[in-house]
């Protein structure tokens, strides 16, 4: 059977294709529409995945939407009723959005994807999240924990999943309902700190390392308070709603009470000043406190899940599982022997879960475990002609060894290089298929790259990719089996002896979101790292996603060429080709004195 | 009548100017209008004889300069609103945007469409420019507490006043040549402008109207219902439903078809 999973309408629309019970491909719409976080029905992505699989829309047995829109609508109506007369803005926005598009999703999907209406099915938001983890790993039964902003009603779901030859079994054990939500708490404070919701959560996590959790007690009290009729079990939590407004307003998720507790907010979009001023310190402290509270809450939830199920494996999903720092804490806590996280734990991943869960309940419950999450498209590189870009001088490598040697030579020579090889990554992390690579050492490297490719805040470090057999020598604090670190889903500590040599990839608190590279996950990149190690004795490279500020990660060769030009990368490797920019064009080193205009890309 | 819109816009301008975000958006909008006018006038100028052509090109260049001034201003008021422009110091994107506006102007007219006569065009320019002058003067006067409004608007006003002057002069000259056709032309232009204004007004009514309807629905229906329901302990803000369903989820056909 051919099943297509779809998630759309909020942010990060995505699709996944399951053929005969096996996940064959998955991609986010933004990679094709080139609009970051594109929420629209993923028409382009579906077409592309179907084409690549040699299928037509008529071959699909089901198109499974990742949640139940009407149930969500009823929750929003209930919230409007419960908040009256204080929720006009939320009511108006909801009415508008829902009547304009969201309620007609069945019709819209059928029309946009050219499938009959009766083949459209609807999963459940948290089931999709849980299934995305469970059905992509080799487990027969596990506890599930889903924590996100909100699904239909629930914001947190503790459950259990099992699969046997009859199919998939799912049991919900405990839930926490909207508006009590750890995801929305995180978003509210993200906005309070002046970052954009749905984009800025990573920045809050990065900022946390700069602060002291001196507000942990206050924020903790906001989560704990009013436990009089808390849901069953000690894992349940409630928000002190007097401090929040995410159920009343679309613009502002907090109330004045929060400001009396934490001080005045950072105005939205104001560039963040990491200047050591009183305010900057306070914001970093708030971020650190929030992170601390989140970790404590997640640990409690995990303990509760263990207690309720007795399982030794936890499948953990939902938008909150994008928080790699908290993932590391959970993995190392040992509450569960195995902690499993899907590479796209946000709502994009719901497309995979929805499709796999449908297949599993229709006679195909044995999806193979997902190895390296390379589920996207293959770059359209021709063997007989280099990519079409005359701002680069192209060379063709005779074989893979020659290519790796050449690229390693460029990297050792401190060039910053785009790397496009094989199927694109699934999820927000670049794992060496669409990456920008550079040397990880040098004191100015981080500032140089931040300015050059991302034009982003200086407080955010880049991530290293390290050869698996030397990982323990460089880093400590891996989770069991280093499973999360293999996909950059967790954060570890750089050993002090290596911090200087990994300066650009080490956060202020000595942490790093490492990718542990095994040969079978990306053979060519592995070979490149070996070649680089031979030249420099460094077994790691700096690896960041291949995109310019504000644009989605590149997908095709054309995207890569355009983005390389925008970032003024020194070189672009699209095996078997390597394109070099002449030095005069390239972005100057951090130390060079140049007119400011030339240093931007 | 046709100056009404500018008067209202001028009078409520502090509401815009006092919010950096809103003001920056407004300034970007002004910049876009100036750019469009620039291309439009340059296009028409090409069809005119000298020395009017030079005069019109000078006007077109003024508008391009105004475009730059407004963009600059918007950037200074709220850098975060115009952040897109900061990503693009090479200017390739703004070049592209300009090309788009230019293409819009240069679109071939529908084959049977009658091009406006010089009189009509100049009357149109005169009316639009004088509206701009009125709006800027009101802006300057009402927002004189704002340093940039105080200092920047006069730089624009000098040009705009000159535009009013020369367009009125050319229109007068044309009128003397053919009073009767021009009278008909005058009403045609007036009709065109009023129709545009009416469309703008309708759009505004639509926005306000749907706001009114949701407001009525919310305060007239949802609120009383919510208050009653809360009085009887049905729902509370922190507890939207009595109990969340727990237990095994039947993943059957009914489940998959329920939306
Ligand atoms: Fe979610
Ligand atoms: Fe002007
Ligand atoms: Fe003018």
Image (tube, rainbow, N blue to C red):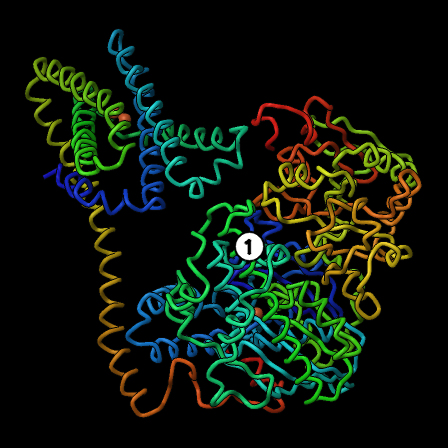
Determine the residue located farthest toward the top in the rendered image.
Answer: B50
Q: Secondary structure at mark 1?
A: loop
Is residue A475 placed above or below A387 in the rendered structure? Answer: below
Is A194 on the left or on the right of B12, as rendered? right
Q: Quadrant of residue A438?
A: top right
Query: Which residue is found at the position 32% from the left and 29% from the top?
Result: B34
- Up-down relation of residue A284 to residue A238 (above or below): above
Q: Using the rendered view, name the quadrant where residue A336 is placed.
A: bottom right
Q: How far across and down, in percent of the image, does residue B91 sit?
A: 51, 29
Residue A78 at least partly seen: yes
Where residue A72 sits in the image (x, y, percent)?
A: 47, 75
> In the image shown, does A408 or A363 lie closer to the viewer?
A408
Above or below — where is B209 with respect to A84?
Answer: above
Q: Looking at the picture, how far across and down is residue A99, in whole percent?
A: 37, 67
Confirm or reject: label 1 Cβ below 8 Å from ligand 1. Answer: no
Image position of A209 with respect to A531: above or below: below
Of the 4 image quadrants, the one containing the C terminus of chain A is top right
Q: Residue at x 19, y 45 (%)?
A: B12
- For the N terminus of chain A, give its image quadrant: bottom right
**Position of A64 compared to B219: left or right?**
right
Name the quadrant where ligand 3 sits: top left
Location of mark 1 (residue):
A37
């Amino acid at each position: 059977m051919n099943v297509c999973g779809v998630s759309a309408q909020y942010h990060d629309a995505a699709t996944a294709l399951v053929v005969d019970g096996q996940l064959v491909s998955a991609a986010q719409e933004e990679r094709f529409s080139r609009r970051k976080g594109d929420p629209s029905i993923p028409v382009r992505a579906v077409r592309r995945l179907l084409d690549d699989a040699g299928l037509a829309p008529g071959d699909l047995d089901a198109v499974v939407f990742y949640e139940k829109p009407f149930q969500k609508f009823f929750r929003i109506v209930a919230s409007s009723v419960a908040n009256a007369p204080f929720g006009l803005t939320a009511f108006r926005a909801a009415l508008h959005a829902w009547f304009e598009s969201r309620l007609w999703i069945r019709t819209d999907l059928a029309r946009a994807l050219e499938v009959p209406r009766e083949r459209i099915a609807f999963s459940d938001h948290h089931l999709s999240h849980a299934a995305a983890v469970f059905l992509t790993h080799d487990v027969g039964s596990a506890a599930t924990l889903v924590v996100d902003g909100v699904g239909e009603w629930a914001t947190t779901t503790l459950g259990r999943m099992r699969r046997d030859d009859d199919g998939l079994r799912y049991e919900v054990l405990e839930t926490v309902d909207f508006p009590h939500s750890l995801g929305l708490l995180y978003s509210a404070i993200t906005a309070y700190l002046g970052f954009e919701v749905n984009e800025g959560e990573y920045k809050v996590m990065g900022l946390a390392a700069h602060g002291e959790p001196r507000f942990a007690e206050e924020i903790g009290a906001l989560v704990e308070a009013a436990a009089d009729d808390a849901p069953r079990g000690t894992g349940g939590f409630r928000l002190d709603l007097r401090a929040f407004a995410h159920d009343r307003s679309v613009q502002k998720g907090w109330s004045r009470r929060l400001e009396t507790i934490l001080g005045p907010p950072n105005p939205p979009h104001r560039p963040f000043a990491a200047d050591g001023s009183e305010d900057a310190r306070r914001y970093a402290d708030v971020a650190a406190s929030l992170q601390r509270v989140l970790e404590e809450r997640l640990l409690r939830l995990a303990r509760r899940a263990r207690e309720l199920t007795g399982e030794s494996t936890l499948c953990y999903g939902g938008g909150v599982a994008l928080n790699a720092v908290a993932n590391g804490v959970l993995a190392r806590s040992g509450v569960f022997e195995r902690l499993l996280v899907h590479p796209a734990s946000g709502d994009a991943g719901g497309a995979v879960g929805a499709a796999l869960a449908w297949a599993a309940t229709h006679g195909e419950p044995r999806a193979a475990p997902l190895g390296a999450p390379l589920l996207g498209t293959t770059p359209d590189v021709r063997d007989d002609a280099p990519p079409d870009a005359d701002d680069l001088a192209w060379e063709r490598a005779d074989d893979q060894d020659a290519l790796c040697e050449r690229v390693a030579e460029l990297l050792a020579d401190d060039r910053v290089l785009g790397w496009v090889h094989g199927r694109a990554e699934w999820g927000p992390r670049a794992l060496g298929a669409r990456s920008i690579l550079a040397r990880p050492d040098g004191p100015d490297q981080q500032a140089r790259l931040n300015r050059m490719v991302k034009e982003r805040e200086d407080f955010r470090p880049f991530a290293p990719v390290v050869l698996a057999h030397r990982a323990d020598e460089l880093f400590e604090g891996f989770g069991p089996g280093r499973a999360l670190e293999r996909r950059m889903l967790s954060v570890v500590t750089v050993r002090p002896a290596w911090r200087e040599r990994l300066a650009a990839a080490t956060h202020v608190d000595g942490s790093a979101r490492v990718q542990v590279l095994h040969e079978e996950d990306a053979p060519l990149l592995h070979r490149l790292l070996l070649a680089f190690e031979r030249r420099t004795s460094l077994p790691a490279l700096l690896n960041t996603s291949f995109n310019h500020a504000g644009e989605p990660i590149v997908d095709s060769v054309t995207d890569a060429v355009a983005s390389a030009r925008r970032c003024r990368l020194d070189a672009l490797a699209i095996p078997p080709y390597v394109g070099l920019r002449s030095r005069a064009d390239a972005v100057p080193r951090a130390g060079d004195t140049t007119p400011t205009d030339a240093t931007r890309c | 009548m046709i100056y009404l819109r500018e008067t209202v816009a001028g009078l409520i301008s502090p509401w815009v100017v006092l919010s950096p975000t809103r003001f920056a958006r407004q300034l970007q909008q002004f910049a876009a209008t100036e750019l469009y006018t620039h291309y439009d006038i340059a296009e028409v100028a090409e069809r005119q004889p000298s020395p009017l052509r030079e005069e019109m090109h000078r006007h077109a260049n003024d508008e391009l300069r105004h475009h730059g001034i407004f963009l600059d201003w918007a950037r200074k008021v709220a850098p975060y609103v115009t952040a897109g422009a900061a990503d693009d110091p090479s200017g390739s994107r703004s070049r592209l945007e300009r090309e788009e506006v230019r293409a819009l102007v240069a679109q071939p007219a529908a084959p049977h469409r009658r091009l406006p006569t010089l009189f009509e065009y100049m009357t149109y320019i005169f009316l639009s420019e004088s509206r701009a002058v009125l709006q800027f003067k009101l802006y300057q006067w009402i927002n004189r507490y704002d340093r940039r409004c105080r200092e920047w608007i006069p730089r624009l006003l000098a040009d705009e006043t000159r535009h009013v002057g020369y367009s009125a002069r050319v229109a007068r000259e044309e009128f003397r040549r053919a009073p009767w056709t021009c009278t008909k032309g005058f009403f045609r232009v007036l009709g065109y402008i009023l129709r545009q204004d009416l469309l703008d007004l309708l759009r505004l009514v639509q926005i306000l109207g749907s706001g009114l309807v949701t407001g009525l629905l919310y305060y007239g229906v949802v609120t009383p219902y919510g208050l009653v329901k809360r009085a009887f302990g049905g729902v509370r803000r922190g507890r939207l439903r009595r109990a969340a369903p727990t237990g095994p989820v039947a993943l059957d056909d009914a489940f998959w078809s329920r939306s």
